[in-house]
Image: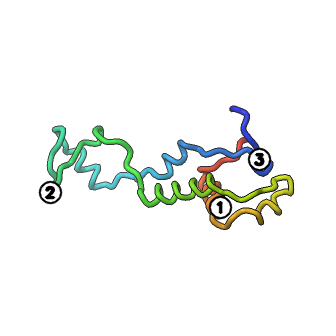
Amino acid sequence: MEELFNVAGEEFYFDLDKISEFIKLEKQENLEDLLKEVQSEEVEDTDGNAVIPEESYGQIIDITKWELTKAMIEVVLSEQGELDESMGLAKLESQLSIPFRISFNTLLINKILKKNG
């Protein structure tokens, strides 16, 4: 792996594959059944709505998870405070905003933000 910059004595990075996996919406049973029945490029479902075969569209995402994940990443990337990393983690923690700490912890717990090594 590439040499990374240190942040508070550790090397962190965003796992883009984990983000994709985390926000992916699992298909619902009735949607799978409907898609199996599709023979042409486009058909109508029981309500008259157009249905496009699974091969024709990309990943379906959980929009709530995506928006929250995106917002937390933006908070982490936009922290503006003057920080003295040489003072150690305890002092550094007190210099960081509450939104940053919550976002950082959430991304770390969900393995979206990872420590190198």
Q: Residue drawn at (15%, 59%), measured in percent from left and top?
A: 47
Q: Which mark is residue 100?
A: 1
Q: Residues within 10 Å of mark 2 (few under 14, many from 20)?
A: few
CA separation in Å, label 1 and label 2 = 47 Å
Residue at image point 81% right, 58% down: 89
> Could you say where residue 102 lies in the image, as x and y percent from the top left?
64, 64
Tell me, yes or no, whether the two marked residues, 3 and 2, touch with CB atoms within 8 Å. Answer: no
- Number of the front mark, 3 or 2: 3
Q: Which mark is residue 46?
A: 2
Which x, y percent locates residue 100?
65, 61
Q: Quadrant of the N terminus?
A: top right
Q: Find the distance from the CA under tag 3 to the CA under tag 2.
A: 55 Å
Question: Neighbour class for label 3 at 10 Å: few (<14), some, many (≥20)?
Answer: few
Choose mark 3 or mark 1, whichever is in front: 1
Residue 30 position, x and y percent, is 27, 55
Earlier-in-chain disc, 3 versus 1: 3
**What residue is at 66 percent from the left and 60 percent from the top?**
105
User: From mark 3 to mark 1, how far is it between C-alphas?
Assistant: 17 Å
Q: Nearer the viewer, residue 30 or 113?
A: 113
Q: Amino acid at mark 2?
A: Thr
**Which mark is on residue 10?**
3
**Image x and y of residue 24, in percent:** 44, 50
Marked residue nearer the N-terminal end (1 or 2): 2
Q: Identify residue type, mark 3.
A: Glu
Q: How many labels, in total?
A: 3
Which of marks 2 and 3 precedes in the sequence? 3
Quarter of the figure that contains the C terminus? top right
Residue at 63% x, 50% y is 113
Secondary structure of residue under mark 3: loop
Q: Nearer the viewer, residue 40 or 62?
A: 62
